Image (cartoon, grey):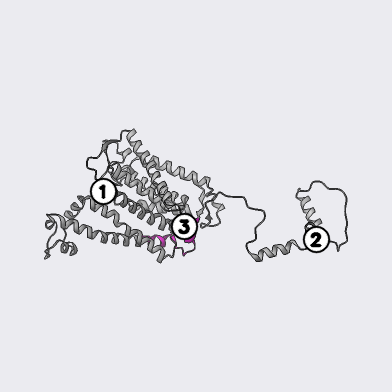
Amino acid sequence: MREIKMPAFMKDAGNTKAHSMWREMAIFILLYVISIFVEAMAMVPGLLVYIASRPDAASWFERAGSSDVTGGLWNGSVDMDKYSALLQAQPEWLLIYTLFAEILLIALYVGYCRLIEKRSFSSMGFTRGHILVRYIKGLLWAVVLFGGAYLFCIGTGAVHFGGVSADMIPGYIVLYFVGYMIQGMAEEVICRGYLLVSLSRNHSVWYSVVISSGVFMAMHMSNDHMTLLAFINIFLCGLLFGLIFVERGNIWMVAALHSGWNFLQNNIFGIPVSGMAQGNSVFLTSFTEGRSLISGGAFGVEGGIAVTAVLAVGIYITYRRMEKKGMLVEPEQLENPGQMFTGEAPRQERTEKAPESADEQKEEVEYTSMPLNLDTLNRIETQKREAGILTKSSGEQITYPRSTVFNADYFREKDEE
């Protein structure tokens, strides 16, 4: 398989200290554990408000000497079975609150890259220029890819379109959209902006894309209704996101694609996102019994072959785009894993190198004004003749005294006159 040249936006990361793969993964696991703790702490205020607002709140706790709900939560006297059942019935606003809380994860990983790794924002994909255009392109990609999978399911009878939902609440739809923009960006910062780029400092781009895709898959292991095909699809999803991230040279488009996919699935067409709870939606979708291999069933479309097909097409299209840009080369053509690529099509090397400084320019001028004697010119003609450049000879030998020289400045002065 051909290797991928490293894109220019990862240049700054290559100038920072690299770690071995095992150390890089150890750092990632530590950060991930911290992020789980941070997310759990962020959820506490919302959960307290939710539980305390219920008329039967006291019955969910064993008092253990505490006369209020908050005390029962903090002193560990919660009946966890009842608590889990309570979370399954959480209201819409709490689901949205969960999505918004992931902004803390963005801050955590960006903060680590900036303060500890000393990486720039651009090395994480936060490049400047045309941000809105790139984001819109990402949302359009989401429409095309998810729309293709949904139409595949409709065409095979695996799902049925149920029309507009009577329970739709426009305000919730808007809040879900913003929430998924945050949630999608958080996962892209973690797996692409941070991990993929960090791995590429000491490994090939392909290797970094594959490993980060595997981590992305592992992050969804605990989701409900997980299947083997769902695992494969999530890995392919990570592969597609990683390739787009590298090919496009920024995080904006892939974050929009990720967020747009989740929003379309959950809040436009009413399908669970990777086994997670379904929220308020514009349309209704029902699943056909016995067709979960195509539709994904309770896990959502990511668990079916309809998504496998569209992801394969997306990966192929992205791969071909990289090929046309000259980003794919044979492994032996890479001098090292950190070889840079500017994003431009490869150009032929120029025969003359332009001077890079005033000193070099001065040296070049001095060289051209040096006298050339006859021996040097004869030697040049001999070399040309041996190389086949000069095929004809006049047959006339011209001789000059050894002291004869040809000075380029003499002819230049004559031309100026």
The quarter in which the C terminus is drawn is bottom right
Q: Specify whether 190 is left or right of 325.
A: left
Image coordinates for residue 210, horizontal then vertical, percent: 43, 51
Give the secondary structure at mark 1: helix
Comparing 117 with 270, the one in front is 270
Gap in angstroms between the C-alphas marked 3 and 1: 40 Å
Image coordinates for residue 268, horizontal then vertical, percent: 30, 43
Gap in angstroms between the C-alphas marked 1 and 2: 84 Å
Q: Is residue 79 visible?
A: no
Amino acid type shown at disc 1: Tyr
Earlier residue among tags 3 and 1:
1
Amino acid type shown at disc 2: Tyr
Label 2 crowd (10 A; few <14 / some 14-19 / many >=20): few
Residue 175 belongs to the span the image colors magenta: no
Amino acid type shown at disc 3: Ser
Q: Specify whether 369 is left or right of 217.
A: right
Residue wearing tag 1: 172
Q: Taken as a whole, is the magenta stretch helix, strand or loop?
A: helix
Residue wearing tag 2: 410
Magenta stretch, residue numbers: 8-28
Gap in angstroms between the C-alphas marked 2 and 3: 56 Å
Tell whether label 1 touches label 3 (CB within 8 Å).
no
Tell whether label 3 touches label 2 (CB within 8 Å).
no
- Which labelled disc corresponds to residue 364? none
Residue wearing tag 3: 200
